[in-house]
Image: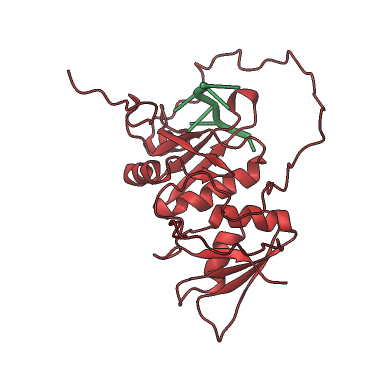
Amino acid sequence: MSGEAAAGGGGEANGVQPNVTIYINNLNEKIKLEALKKSLNAVFSQFGKIIEVLAFKTLKHKGQAWVVFEDVASATEALKRMQDFPFYDKPMKIQYAKTKSDVVAKADGTFVPREKRKRNDEKPEKKQKREQHHDVNQAGVGMHAYPGAYGAPPLSQLPFGAGPKVMMPEIIVPNNILFVQELPHDATALMLQMFFCQYPGFKEVRMIEAKPGIAFVEYGDEGQATAAMNLLQGFKIKENPMRITYAKK
DNA sequence: AGCACA
């Protein structure tokens, strides 16, 4: 009679034991794999060293990814802190992976090259293509142009004091250049680049010598800038969440 | 919904 864990779909203990690898689903399936993996890497590296990020585009594995950490503590922290984090507009659902990742098994010495694999994982049946639309936004992601367009803030990552106070809404003009504020004063362009360069369309980071704590980050177009902004909004480089808006034109 | 190792 050990207690019951489920508190109504929240997902604490799923009967799966802690693992250095976390399994993520409910990911936005419109995002291209490469961008997705890089973004996951960017968002999760704050919890510890990441060994590998895996994601696949097969029907059976769309919208899912595995992030392999170096240690269980990092995975646990990531699981807890990033649960329901709005990622490309969808709350991530995170669990521990059910099995050990190959990369870990290889380090273990317990790796067995897949022999007991099911052979029917390929189903070339229905190959219908539906083209009711052109690809909506394969590359751009940025359907919305508002920085506050998140779902529900997961934790204290989001800086805005969304209190009852009503503010005069500023007119937001999208720009391929982002304006980043509230950075640690010793942040360097190189440091910022590590975060911002991981999103498609990244061009450069510019800092102003005379004004510590701010930076401009340029992307190829507004959609790319928007995607990066939404993913990094409120992200903590050191300990304070950074604030990202579009640069003024 | 869906737990793999292009």
Colour for chain B in the figure = green
Vertical relation: A145 (above or below) A181: above
A147 or A53: nearer the eye?
A: A147
Q: Which chain is red?
A: A
Q: Quadrant of residue A170?
A: bottom right
Tell me what residue is drawn at x 52 percent, y 53 percent: A42
Relative vertical location of residue A86 with respect to residue A26 in this rendering, above or below? below
Q: Residue at point 46% right, 37% down? A: A103
**Image label count:** 0
The quadrant the C terminus of chain A occupies is: bottom right
| The image quarter in which residue A109 lies | top left
Q: Position of residue A34 (x, y in %)?
A: 64, 44
Residue A14 against residue A92 in the figure, above or below: above
Q: Position of residue A174 (x, y in %)?
A: 70, 61
- Whether residue A199 is visible to the viewer of this picture, yes or no, is no
Residue shown at the point (41%, 33%) measured from the top left: A95
